[in-house]
Amino acid sequence: ELEDGLRVPSIVSFNESVLIGTEAKKYIGSKNTVFGIKQLLGRTVNAAFKDHIMKLPFTVDTQFERAKIVTDNVGNTERFNVEDIAAFILMKQKMSAEIFLNRNLDTVSITVPTKFTAAQRQSLHNAALIAGFKNIHLVNDNIALLLHHIMQQTKADSYMDKKYIVAISMGAAYLNICVASILNNCIEVNRMWHQKIGGKDFDEKIFETFVRHRYARYPKDLKTILLNRFGDAKINLTLKDETEIDLSNLSKKFDNVLLTREKFEEACSQLILSIKKVLLESINHAKTFDKHVTIIVGGLVGKLPQIRSELNGFNTIYYNDDDLSKGAAIHCAHMTNDERRNITLKNKTYFRYKFECDYMSPVIIESGSSLPVTKTFDIYGHYGTCDFKIVE
C-alpha cells in the first residue's frame, strides 16, 4: 500500500513545509495551495488563460511570457514556474514508487489528454526532468486504455481477426474518445474525438444550482472548498441514489444539501447530453467497419448511470482509474523494447500541421494523418541557412 493509496491528488500546499497529495488536500482553498496544474502547463498567457486563472484561489503572475505561481511561505514570497509545481507531484510519485519497488527509477510514462499541444507536452516533459526522470514518455489517455485492454486478453480471446474498439476516457477537464482497430497485437487508431468536458465541469454545475442560485452573496474564498465537496458528492452518487453535502460548518449562511441522483442529472443534463452525442457519433463511426464493436470505458464517464444505461446494448468493458496507470506502464515497457510487450502502435495526428520555409512553400499535414507521415517539397533559391517554421 502506498502512503496515499493508489492515487496521489495533484495538489501542492506551501506551509512551513511543502505538502503534496492527501496532506495538501486538507488546505484546499488557501492562497498557498495549488491544484489543477495540468491545465496550466504550456499555456500561452492570453485572454483565455487570464480568464481561467481568475477563478483560482491561488495567485498566478502573468506579467511575463511564462506564468508564475506566487506563494507566501511563512512571510517569504516565492515564485514558481508551472513546471516546478508539476515536478513536486511527480517527485512524490517517484519517491513512493521507489520505496515500493526498493530500487531507483529513471524511466516514466505519463498519460496526457489527446488534445495536449506540443507546448503542453514539452512543459510536462520538462517537469518530469526536474523531478529526476531521464527517460520520459508521454502517451494519450485512450492509447493507455487500449494497451491495458489488449494485455488483458487471454490467448483464447486474442485478436486473430481485426476488431474495432471504441476507447472512452474522461478526466478532470477533458473527454477523449478514439476508434481503433486491433489485429495480432497491432493497434491502429482510426479516428479521434475530443471535448473540453471533465469532472470539474460537473462540480461547477452543481455549484451553480445549489449555491450561486440560492445565495446571491457567498464568501468567494469558500468556492474551492465547495467545489471540492461537490466533487466528492458526485463520486458518491455513482454508488448510491442520494448523498448529503455538509455545508453548514463552512458558513452560517449555508444549509446542508441533500443531493439526489435525479437532481444531479437535472443540473448536469447539458453536459451529459454533449457526452452522449459525441459518444454515439464515435460508436456509429466504428460500426461502419464492424457491427460487433467493443467499447472500453475509463474515468468518470463510466461511472455516470445515464451513460452506462446508454451503453447497455453494447459489449462494454469498464476499467478502474488505476487501469490507466497500468496502460502507461505497458507503454513504458513497449518504448524500452521489452520483448514481453510485443505490441505495435500506429497512431494518428490530432492537430493539423503547417511547415513553412521563409513563409514560402507551405506543406500541410492534415489532422488524422497516419504516423509516421512523410511529405516532400522543393525550395527554389540559394540558401546558406534555412529556417523552418512549424505551425500546430
Image: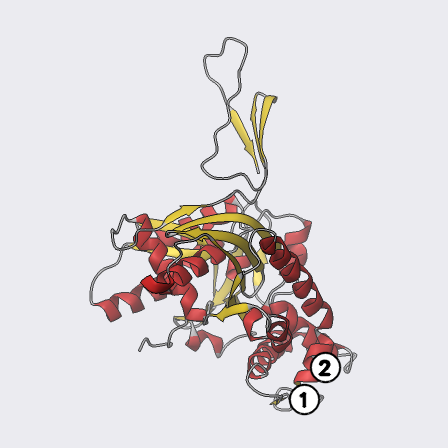
Query: Do the residues under discs 2 and 1 have CB atoms within 8 angstroms?
Result: yes
Quadrant in which the C terminus is drawn: top right
> Callout 2: 10 Å neighbours few (<14), some, many (20+)?
some
Tell me, yes or no, if residue 88 can be seen here.
no
Image location (x, y in percent) of residue 74: 45, 70
Under tag 2, what secondary structure?
helix
- Which amino acid type corresponds to the residue marked 2 in the rendered image? Phe
Measured along the vertical axis of the image, is residue 312 above or below residue 151? below
Image location (x, y in percent) of residue 366: 59, 36
Position of 382 compared to 158: left or right? right
Quarter residue 273 falls in:
bottom right
> Callout 1: 10 Å neighbours few (<14), some, many (20+)?
some
Position of 128 compared to 391: left or right? left
- Which comes sooner in the sequence, label 2 or label 1? 2
Tell me, yes or no, if residue 209 can be seen here.
yes
Position of 2 compared to 266: left or right? left
Image location (x, y in percent) of residue 168: 54, 62
> Which residue corresponds to the image point at 68% horizontal and 57% vertical from the top-left?
51
Image location (x, y in percent) of residue 93: 35, 65
Under tag 1, what secondary structure?
strand
- Which amino acid type corresponds to the residue marked 1 in the rendered image? Val
Q: Could you say which is closer to the camera, residue 331 or residue 283?
A: 283
**In the rendered image, which residue does mark 2 sit on?**
210
Residue found farthest to the top:
382
**In the rendered image, which residue does mark 1 sit on?**
257
Mark 2–mark 1 Cα distance, whole angstroms, equals: 8 Å
Quarter residue 210 falls in:
bottom right
